[in-house]
Image (cartoon, helix red, strand yellow):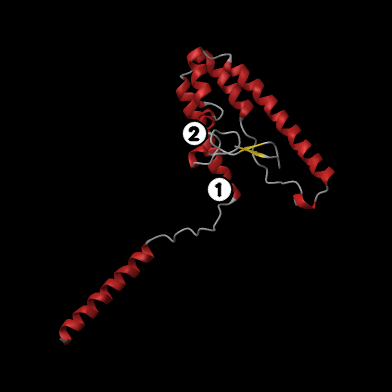
Amino acid sequence: MNILRKSILIGFTVLGMAAAQAQEAKPAPKQHDAHPSKEQMQAKMADMYAKRQARLHDLLKLTAQQESAWANYQAAIKPPAFDGKRPEHKPFNKLTAPERLTLALDMTKKREAFLETRVKAVSAFYGQLNPAQQTLFDEHGLGGERGRRGHWGHHGHRGWGHEGGDQHEGWGGQRKG
C-alpha cells in the first residue's frame, strides 16, 4: 500500500512540476482592463486603413491612366496624423447651454469642411472610373460594406432609422414603432 501511495505522490509531483514549467514558458495573458497605448492604436488604425485602401485598389483594377487620379484621391482623403495634442476638455455637463451649442456648431462646421473636401476628392476620382468600377466603388468604397448592414448591424444592433429598430423623433422626442 505504501508503494502505491508513494507512486501516486511522485506522479502528482511530476505533473505539478510539468505544469509549472509550462506556465513559465507561456507568455502572460493580457489583462482585460489593459488598454493599448495611443501609438499602438494609431499604428493599428493606419494599418487597417492601408489594407482597406489596398483592397479597394485591387478590386477596381485601375488602368495606368487612372493611377494618377487614384494617387490624388488618396492624398485628399488620407486621415491626418494625430499630433498628440488635444484641446482642453471641459466636461460637457459643466458647460452652459450657449457653450454647448457653440461647441456643437463648431464641430458641425469642422465636419462640414471635412465632408466638402471629401466630396470634391471622391467626385474627381469617381469621374475617372468606368461604370463597372463605379459600381464596385459604390459597393466597397467609403463604408459601402458597412452601409448595407447599418452602422452596428454586424453586432445585431438596430439603431435609429434601421428597419426593425426604434425610431426616434430627434433627441428626446417621442418613440415611434
Under mark 1, the amino acid is Gln
For the C terminus, the quadrant is: top right
Which residue is at a point 48% across and 15% down the rendered structure image?
132
Q: Is residue 89 visible?
A: no
Marks 2 and 1, Cα distance to the nearest angstrom?
Answer: 16 Å
- Position of residue 124 in the picture relative to residue 61 (left or right): right
Which residue is at a point 47% across and 29% down the rendered structure image?
55
Disc assigned to residue 40:
1
Q: Quadrant for residue 102, please give it.
A: top right
Q: Is residue 25 above or below residue 141?
A: below
Q: Is residue 112 visible?
A: yes
For the N terminus, the quadrant is: bottom left
Q: Position of residue 133 (x, y in %)?
A: 49, 17
Question: In front here: 110 or 46?
Answer: 110
Q: Position of residue 31 (x, y in %)?
A: 50, 60
Q: Residues within 10 Å of mark 1 (few under 14, many from 20)?
A: few
Under mark 2, the amino acid is Lys
How many numbered marks, from 0 up? 2
Q: Is residue 148 above or below residue 10?
A: above
Which residue is at a point 62% across and 28% down the rendered structure image?
77
SS state under label 2: helix
Q: Quadrant for residue 108, please give it.
A: top right
Q: Quadrant for residue 3, please give it.
A: bottom left
- Position of residue 24 in the picture relative to residue 97 (left or right): left
Which residue is at a point 55% across and 43% down the rendered structure image?
43
Residue identifier under label 2: 51
